[in-house]
Image: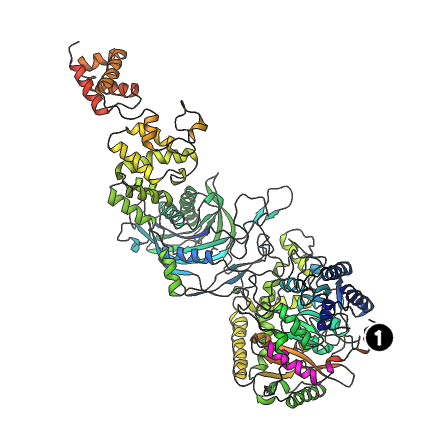
Amino acid sequence: MAELKTRLIVGMEIHVQVRTASKLFCACPVVYDAPPNSAVCPVCLGHPGTLPVMNRRAVEQAALVGLALNCTIAHFTKWDRKSYFYPDLPKNYQISQYDLPIARDGWFEFPDPNGAGSGASRDGASPSGLSRVRIRRAHLEEDAGKNLHDRGDGSLIDLNRAGTPLIEIVTEPDLHTPGACYAFAVELQRLMRHLGVSDGVMQRGQMRFEPNVNVAIECDGCEIRTPIAEIKNLNSFKAIRNAVEYEYGRQVAQWRGDPEYVIGRRPNENRGWNDARGLTEYQRPKEAAHDYRYFPDPDLAPATFDDAKLAAIRARLPELPAARVRRLAERFGLSAADAETIVDDRATADLFDESIRAGAPADVLARQVVNVWASLANEHGTTVAGLGVGAAAMAELAEMVRSGTVSATAAARIAAAMIPDADPAPTTVTPHVAAAEDRSPQALAAKLGLLQEKDADATQAWVDEAFRLNEQAVRDARSNPKKAKQAAGFLRGQVMKLSEGRADPALVGELIEKKLAEPT
Amino acid sequence: MLTVFETAEGVRRGRVPAEDVMHDCLKRISAAAEIRAFLHVDAERSLAAARRIDEARSRGEALGPLCGVPIAVKDNLCTSFAPTTCGSAMLAGFSSLYDAEVVRRLERAGAIVVGKTNLDEFAMGSSTENSAFGPTRNPWDPKRVPGGSSGGSAAAVAARLVPAALGSDTGGSIRQPAALCGVTGLKPGYGRVSRFGLVAFGSSLDQVGPIATDARDAALLMNILAGPDARDSTTAPDAPPDYAAAIDAPIDGLSVGLPHEYFGEGLSAEVRAAVHGAIDVLRTLGARTKDITLPHTEYAAACYYLVAPAEASSNLARFDGLRYGRRAGGADLIEVYKASRGQGLGAEVKRRIMIGTHALSSGYYDAYYDKASRVRTLIRGDFERAFSEVDVIAGPVTPTTAFCLGEKASDPLAMYLSDVYTIPANLAGICGISVPCGFDARGLPIGLQLMGPVFGEARLLQTAHQFQLATDYHRGVPPAFLATEAAA
């Protein structure tokens, strides 16, 4: 068979659960992990006689997302009923938006692992060095409930989720590598978190990505395209990449075996990702036109945005993650990876900026956030901002390292003790006393005995002790040219260990060199 | 029987205990069981509520404006304390989790919801024959229909079983049975009264309104019913006027439009004569009449029978038997849907669901639903132009007086045409009232329809009240119920 040139084509449909206090059309709280059917009322149960009342906050959040996606926001948008029968849909219609979505015709940029523009459309390289995906539309709709099939015989329905606000975002088919799909999804999640619109936890269904995948195949000078498969059940970024990768290969292979496997001649289909087996499974054909019988919902007035209201929403638009990463990298000389780690969580990025304003040296602070604070956050199951350490305290600790008041190692121990519910000095202080303790890094350094020791006598004593305990290394350092350098390094390490990190490394080096030079 | 006004006054002043009022009411209701106005009566709860009012009075507590007034409520209005069936086998035994806003407002004002009245299934019909629980009969002639779909409410008031009732009007369902039963029924302008708790038929057309023996009572009820509701975003935000205070002003100088489209072919001679007679009365009261035209009237029925079924097909989709209501067995989900809806819903409801589903289908939407929506705009424009020239529009409510049971049951088109004069007001969202204005040779009542601009209910009630001060058609009691009336 002739050499094939293939090109992957992916458009993404994303559902984002909007984090609001109440549901889209009733006063029920938006909850996760609550007992089944405990956050429901006659309205979201779809009981006879009930009427929806629009949640303004959700509409504003959708407009905010539209603005962040560089969309045109509709001045006039309405609600439509989308009809289909399904047990998790209490009214057997979903209140959604059909022909007048809140937002349309935008674009979104993301850092592409394969280089700007390579994973997105040919004209998708942006001047900023990011890849660009066009956004077709973004609209608001109510979520359905959940069918539970695994509880004994018969199916059960949990309607806690029914009526939760969802933003549906539809991109143009501008993604062309599995890696780009992955990076796009990561960046979109970061955006939603940054905007405060959604927690975006995929495992909880707060963000649901459905790639629409097909392949353009160039063969004997002609280009054919395979039918489009919409992939469901993706609950991690890795699953998105793997599923798209798998589907790319599957479609090309299927076409090789069946020349009629071409869009229009074979049906488009829904496929489900099986994470355990690492493959997509056929679910059902997409009927050419499932008739949803859309019509304007007579129970709801159209939502309108005048210029003043739009301006007020625009004013709430924060610096977006991609721009923020670029700023941190350029302004403070951080690596892209470090900048992304910091920006990943908006509150953490805000804390970083605030800490800089409070006088923190940027390079030290960045290292501490990425290495120290991030791992502490991980241990505590929260974000860096979630640790409850203030910007001023963080700035102070970074400054103590820069000025040599404490070593980087010591700073990590101090950081751990700065966390409000941590025990500031586990070996010496009982917890109930600890609660009232001063948690400033300066006080903790003193309490923990981590202030850098500049005193030459004390340091000399640690050096002497290290020489006494490590005779072989001393011999190597003095008389074995092959091992001298390594042995001297080892001795410096031993001194730091004996000093429990308090010794000033520069002074230690000086004293070791001096002692080695002394006649034995 | 006492009117709403007299009952509340009597109870408030201690002239008659609420408990006695309720006893009499319950006695009349059970004596009139054969007309099947009620689907459900809760004697115990009603008497307990009446006693509470008497006790509150004896403690010197302030009483609500409708204290002790028994009210019947159409069974498509949700009640937590009584079944809400909508006249459908689908909802036999269904009890709502909450009370409709209008029910809540009435009871907060001291009224007592004594029971739920019969209706065409899901308010779809003009005769109350489409009730799964059997037809209601016209108190003036039990061989005849009371009209519909609020036939139970209209019959209950006509037979003087209760002083007033609530109905709902999607295409004439308050005004038409009020006319056929000889009582006063008001369809408020769209958005004047909360629909929260009204089981939706055609959401953009439905309004709840009062049925009473006279306009004064209807005004008293409107004072309680009207006004914005945060749970119904289609209610108008502005505060309604004091309807009861508005009715006493004379109608000298009132300009009354007479649309020639409402007096054409199909209107029976007797109805025509009675309506003309009523217009003459209005003239003697100082009203000036003016011939007007509502040119798109002939398209109203076709437009309505697309818009209303389209909305109904969507509104009734929730009745699938899964979460509440009647559930039939089936091998799989689709079979359960089919069997539950197939057995739970009646023929007329199914017919409208089919029409509406078709009208909304892709490929047909533009030709049917969308076109009907545009015709609706034209009909609204007709009324806007008319109301720039006149204060109210007068005409018949129905082409004929009450027809016999079964007479139109097999001819849906003939049944649909009995609504030709009432449908336009729903499409335009304006208000309309049916006022008794005479009787035909058989002694069957005839109604005069007055229509006003969207929130012109006060003017309609005023005109109707002034008319009733000059006439006594509204005092007519069906002969079979004169004895009950006298006994009570």
Q: Residues within 10 Å of mark 1 (few under 14, many from 20)?
A: few
- Image position, residue B272 (x, y; %): 68, 87
Q: Residue furthest front?
A: B60
Tell me if A243 is positioned left or right of B326 in this view. left
**The disc labelled 1 sits on which kind of residue?**
Ala
Parent chain of label 1: B
Residue B100: x percent and y percent? 64, 62
Toward which corner of the image does residue B125 lie, by quadrant? bottom right
Front-most of residues B280 and B240: B240
Nearer-the-camera pick, A507 or B92:
A507
The answer to whether A147 appears left or right of B437 in the picture is left
Task: Tell me the quarter of the image containing the C terminus of chain A.
Answer: top left
Q: Is residue B131 visible?
A: no
The residue sitting at the top extreme is A520
Name the chief secondary structure element in magenta.
helix
**At x 76% / y 62%, what residue is drawn?**
B41
Which stretch is magenta? Answer: B457-473
Which residue is identified by label 1? B483
Q: Is residue A59 visible?
A: yes
Q: Quadrant of residue B24?
A: bottom right
**Colouring chosen for the image of the structure:** rainbow
Q: For this rendering, which residue is in front, A328 or B120?
A: A328
Horizontal side of A159 relative to A57 (left or right) equals right
Q: Secondary structure at mark 1?
A: helix
Q: Is residue A349 above or below residue A464?
A: below
Total labels: the figure holds 1
Residue B30 lies, in percent from the top left, at 81, 66
> Is-magenta flag for residue B108?
no
Q: Between residues B286 and A323, which one lies in front from this camera angle?
A: B286
* Residue A268 place in picture, x, y as percent: 47, 54
A377 versus B286 height, above or below: above
